[in-house]
Image (cartoon, helix red, strand yellow):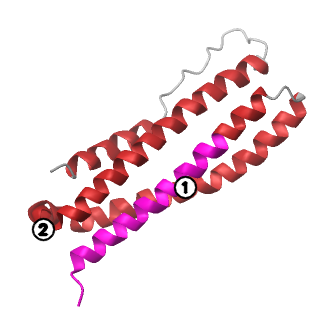
Amino acid sequence: MPDPMEVQLTVLLDGMKKKEQALTEIVNITENQRTVIESGLPIEEVRGFMVEMNKEKHFFIEQVKGCDNMFEAVLKEIGTELDEKQHLYKTQVGQLQAFIRRVMDLDVKVRVQEEKNNQMLTELFPPVQPPAQPGLRPKPKLLPTDNARVIKAYEQEKRFRG
């Protein structure tokens, strides 16, 4: 009978591989969006391409979220025991560390390209400002909630450091 910890670590590795693949697809779509933005196509065509690419990207984002949820659930289940017996599973832990680093690099790459794309879109298609209404203040901008996800991933990666 296989070691239950090894089975759980294999589940984590498979989930990280799936997340890496999904993030790679998101990187490709985001880079294709940049190409469309820079293409010089008419506004309506750019918008149409962007809408379709965002639908495709959303599919992969949902995969990433599913992988994150699975990873957290499995890690919650085995975390204490893994901390205590980490020396027994050095190979799998090393593989997880490598996946986590690659996934974090891909995540940063996506964020940087998304920011560049948003800047280019804003330059090409400035947002239309509604007329100001007297007595109303603009809504404050909130920090993106994804920062919490990045911090959590970093903390998980630290946990697997030897």
Q: Amino acid at mark 2?
A: Leu
Which residue is at the front of the view, 131 or 142? 142
Mark earlier in primary sequence (2, 1): 1
Relative image position of residue 152 (x, y in whole percent): 33, 45
Residue type, label 1: Ala
The CA span between labels 2 and 1 is 30 Å
Report the residue at 70% width, 40% height from top: 32
Q: Secondary structure at mark 2?
A: helix
Which quadrant of the structure image shows residue 128? top right
Majority secondary structure in the magenta region: helix
Residue at 64% from the left image edge and 40% from the top image edge: 30
Residue receiving disc 2: 88
117 shown above or below 94: above
Q: Is residue 126 visible?
A: no
Is 132 placed left or right of 99 in the picture? right
- Which disc number belongs to residue 4? none
Left or right: where does residue 130 sit relative to residue 11? right
Q: Is residue 25 magenta?
A: yes
Residue at image location 31% in from the left, 42% down from the top: 154
Look at the picture and state if 2 lies above or below 17. Answer: below
Q: Is residue 143 visible?
A: yes
The percent coordinates of residue 139 (x first, y second) are 59, 21
Vertical relation: 141 (above or below) 15: above
Q: Badge 2, how many Cα within 10 Å: few under 14, some, many 20+?
A: few
Left or right, 150 with respect to 125, comes to left
Q: Residue at x 78, y 20 (%)?
A: 124
Figure disc tally: 2
Q: Residues within 10 Å of mark 1 (few under 14, many from 20)?
A: many
Q: Nearer the viewer, residue 155 or 106?
A: 106
- In the image, the segment drawn in magenta is 1-30
Residue under pointer 1: 22
Q: Nearer the viewer, residue 154 or 24?
A: 24
